[in-house]
Image (cartoon, helix red, strand yellow):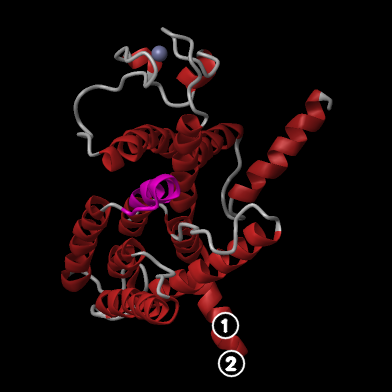
Amino acid sequence: MSCTRLTAACERIIKLFVSPGEKMTEIYYVKKVVRIEVMDILLPVLIFITGLVFGSFFNVVIYRLPREESIVAPRSACPSCGTTLKPADLVPIFSFIFLKGKCRYCKSKISFRYPLIEFVSGIVFVVLFLKYGLSIEFIFTVFLMSVLIMVFFIDLDHMIIPNELVIAGLAGGIVLFILRFFLYDSLLDGAAWYSPLLGMLVTSGSLFLIALIGLAIYGTDAFGMGDVKIFLPIGLILGFKLALISLIFSVFIGGFAGLFLIITGLKERRSHIPFGPFIVSGTFLAILFGHEFFTWYTGLL
Ligand SMILES: [Zn+2]
């Protein structure tokens, strides 16, 4: 592309950001472009990096919490050779790439899961920022999804959802509940102050009932008590409408994924598939599209 055509293309893009009344001198263009870059590029990049750093912490919790090890001490060590890792070995994603996925000291392979969880956390943070901007909603949905990212991988590995994560989620939920009660009750779901209480009761309650019925009929529970409990913080933070949609999405995704795994022979019909990862995916989709889904669905009725 020639230089002048490039400039023309740039100008066209810039014009999109300049409202009709504004005077468009060259210096004005430059200022405008700088502002657009700071707001639209720098901030999401910073949020992404923050997500990576948090993801690195989630890795520690995912590894240690089910093994009942402290999540603050000792410092991270290579699981193969036990060498304490230096800060340069712990830079999210970059250390993994730089070390070509091998321990600097014993050359044993580092699981691809570590950079993956960091990357996923970064993406989740940015997507929620793009959805909510810098707001109270952003802080609490990031908080909930952070807890749920840890739930996703711990349940996948160990088929448990640790109570510690449920309690951490509830603690954040209580803070939001108090904020809703005293500031504005329409935070996140635009409903009355008691909507989070309904959300907890209905989602957690119905899963509990399904688990009881399953236990009575088949002698085995379709959901673990962890699945029942994790909907308490989801309900408390998202409120009734979004929590219910989260449950519906989770059951649908779980159902389709279960069917797919059985048809492709990846899982036996009787084998246990952890439900936590589906709850996490369903909740993320509910946070992103729940309100739109609700409007669309009630439009059909
Ligand atoms: Zn090592």
- Residue drawn at (42%, 58%), measured in percent from left and top? 276
Residue 8 in which image quadrant: top right
Q: Position of residue 166 (x, y in %)?
A: 26, 57
Q: Position of residue 251 (x, y in %)?
A: 51, 70
Picture quarter with the N terminus: top right
In which of the image's four quarters is ligand 1 placed?
Answer: top left
Q: Position of residue 246 (x, y in %)?
A: 45, 69
Q: Is residue 147 magenta?
A: yes
Judged by its main secondary structure, the magenta piece is helix
The amino acid type found where label 1 is placed reads Tyr
The residue beneath circle 2 is: 301
Q: Residue furthest right?
A: 2
Q: Position of residue 299 (x, y in %)?
A: 59, 87
Q: Is residue 225 magenta?
A: no
Q: Are marks 1 and 2 in contact (CB under 8 Å)?
A: yes
- Number of the label disc, if any, that sits on residue 297: 1
Q: Is residue 113 left or right of residue 17?
A: left
Nearest the eye: 297 or 188:
297
Picture quarter with the C terminus: bottom right
Mark 1 neighbour class, 10 Å CA radius: few under 14, some 14 to 19, many 20 or more: few
The amino acid type found where label 2 is placed reads Leu
Q: Is residue 126 left or right of residue 216?
A: right
Span colored in magenta: 146-161
Q: Residue furthest top?
A: 105
